[in-house]
């Protein structure tokens, strides 16, 4: 199963990454080309939110953050996902935005590897992308609440959802390893709708 196969019944088999061409930028600003890495759409302050990550909640994490109150939140594990991982990272929490009318998810992964870096963890996600002809790959140093973080954005083609599908991941180190926050949208418009809430999550992260 590929990462994109998680969200539908499709298990497309060999939908794996073709040749990776990387155009990298470590600056915090990025550029406005490719997958829209320079855009930082702010969340709607009128949207009611819930606090996620506290002990005893749906997802027990080493940090907390805000997300829309009408998103469904559920814990996840490699066992529950049939052993599915991304490199060394296991899914630990899933935020389902479909209840709010958005065709997508925000998923959180944990990589316990002690010798890794945020950049290396993200490179593993890009290398295992189900998209073909991956391009416009950009890495940026950003902040995730109090955490120094690295963000990657890129685009590629999917055999079901067409050309120019966009991806964005954020990685940072916590006491329990490296966390990756992953936007998983079914199509480009949904990706754009999830970006403001991704920004909300990134900005409201706080250590537990």
Image (tube, rainbow, N blue to C red):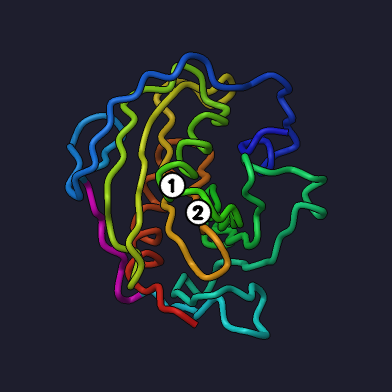
78 left or right of 177 in image: right
Contact between labelled residues 2 and 1, with CB atoms less than 8 Å apart: yes
Residue 185 drawn above or below residue 102: above
> For mark 1, does the 10 Å Cα neighbourhood hold few (<14), some (14 to 19), or many (20 or more) residues?
many
Q: Please tell me which residue lies in front, 191 or 111.
A: 111
**Picture quadrant where residue 15 is located:** top right
Q: Is mark 1 on a helix, strand or loop?
A: strand
The residue located at (74%, 58%) in the rendering is 77
Find disc 1 in the rendering and name its residue. Answer: 169
In the image, what residue occupies the spot 26% across and 62% down?
42
Front residue of 76 and 99: 76
In this view, the residue farthest toward the front is: 115
Residue 54 in which image quadrant: bottom right
- Asked if residue 139 lies in the magenta stretch, the reply is no
**Percent from the top left, x then y, of residue 160?**
59, 23
SS of the residue under disc 2: strand
Tally the numbered discs.
2
Q: Is residue 122 left or right of residue 35?
A: right
Residue 12 in picture, x, y percent from top left: 71, 24
**22 to 42, vertically: above or below:** above
Which region is colored magenta? 39-46
Residue shown at the point (20%, 41%) measured from the top left: 30
Distance between the Cα atoms at labels 1 and 2? 7 Å
Return the residue at label 2.
Answer: 180
- Name the residue rendered at 47%, 21% in the picture: 157
Instruction: Provide the major secondary structure of the magenta segment.
Output: loop
Q: Is residue 49 above or below residue 172?
A: below
């Amino acid at each position: 199963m590929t990462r994109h196969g998680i969200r539908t019944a499709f298990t497309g088999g060999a939908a794996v990454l073709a040749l990776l061409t990387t155009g990298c930028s470590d600056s915090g600003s990025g550029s406005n080309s490719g997958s829209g890495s320079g855009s930082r759409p702010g969340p709607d302050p009128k949207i009611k939110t819930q606090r996620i990550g506290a002990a005893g909640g749906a997802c027990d994490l080493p940090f907390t953050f805000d997300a829309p109150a009408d998103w469904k939140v559920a814990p996840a594990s490699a066992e529950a996902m049939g052993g599915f991982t991304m490199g060394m990272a296991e899914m630990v929490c899933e935020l389902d935005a479909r209840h709010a009318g958005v065709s997508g998810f925000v998923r959180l992964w944990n990589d316990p590897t002690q010798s890794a870096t945020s950049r290396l963890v993200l490179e593993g996600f890009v290398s295992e992308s189900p998209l073909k002809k991956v391009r416009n790959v950009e890495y940026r140093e950003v902040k995730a609440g109090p955490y120094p973080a690295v963000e990657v954005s890129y685009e590629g083609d999917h055999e079901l959802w067409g050309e120019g599908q966009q991806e964005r991941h954020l990685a940072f180190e916590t006491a329990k390893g490296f966390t990756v926050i992953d936007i998983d949208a079914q199509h480009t418009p949904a990706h754009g709708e999830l970006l403001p809430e991704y920004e909300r999550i990134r900005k409201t992260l706080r250590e537990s």
